[in-house]
Image (cartoon, helix red, strand yellow):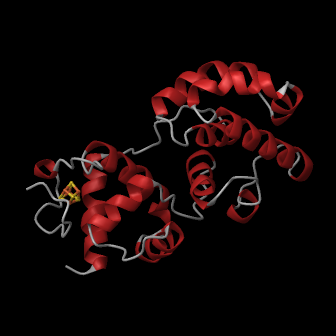
Amino acid sequence: MDTKDKIKVMLDSLQAFYPAASLELNYSSAFELLIAVILSAQCTDARVNQVTQILFKKYKSPQDYIEVDLEELENDIRPSGFYRNKAKLIRGCCETLIRDYESEVPVNIQDMISLPGVGRKTAAMVLGNASAVQQGIAVDTHVKRVVQRLGISPHVEVDKIEQNLMRLVHPEKWTFFSNATILFGRNICQSRKPRCSECPFKDWCPSPDKTI
Ligand code: SF4
């Protein structure tokens, strides 16, 4: 099966498995999603949702994150881990949003990646899910693992994997592809023990990690 066929089969199956694939992070605006994605580094979505349930009631705008003492912000996000670094990133983003973007999250990927600590993964995730702007494919650890196991991209660098995928997947499906592959990676093609007996790709998956 060539790579184009693999992507077609993959999209068909993902569509059947996860027809309305979305992120598992809670948010009500692009700004909230940006904060949630920053907090999700090295943290589960469930834990981030616990933190943001309280956080988003207290902090409504970039200005709110700037005005509070850094220690207080650190304390408010502490359960998400790496809270000192995350607090600095959030403050840096908020300062840039206020200074350069009238406190609004920009709606193109070049402006998004100008925000401190925001790479293409975060930018594509926020744009695709909160603003319905599809200018990239968010390649997180799950997307990277799944496409590598399926032999879809020969690369190890996420930027190169994204470029591969952007050539193979129709732009209208970029956000769906990323969201659904993340769910597939979490639920089926898990890192340590992939559940290959339940996998629709088991007959042709070339991965040495296959468990059947
Ligand atoms: S067969 Fe196993 S390793 Fe291959 S994609 Fe499916 S779950 Fe992942």
Quadrant position of the C terminus in the picture: bottom left
- In this rendering, the answer to whether 93 lies above or below 121 is above
State which image quarter holds ligand 1: bottom left
Residue at coordinates 69% horizontally, 22% vertically from top-left? 76
Residue 92 percent coordinates (x, y): 80, 45
Residue at coordinates 85% horizontally, 49% vertically from top-left? 96
Residue 38 percent coordinates (x, y): 63, 42
Q: Which residue is nearer to you in this view: 133 or 36?
A: 36
Quadrant position of the N terminus in the picture: bottom left
View extreme (left): residue: 212
- In this rendering, the answer to whether 118 lies above or below 7 is above
Q: How many marks?
A: 0
Residue 118 percent coordinates (x, y): 68, 54
Report the side of 191 relative to 80 (left or right): left
Report the side of 61 relative to 177 (left or right): right
Residue 27: quadrant of the picture: top right
- In this rendering, the answer to whether 166 lies above or below 184 is below
View extreme (bottom): residue: 2
- In this rendering, the answer to whether 175 lies above or below 24 is below
Residue 4: quadrant of the picture: bottom left
Residue 155: quadrant of the picture: bottom left
Residue 134 percent coordinates (x, y): 57, 61
Residue at coordinates 20% horizontally, 60% vertically from top-left? 209
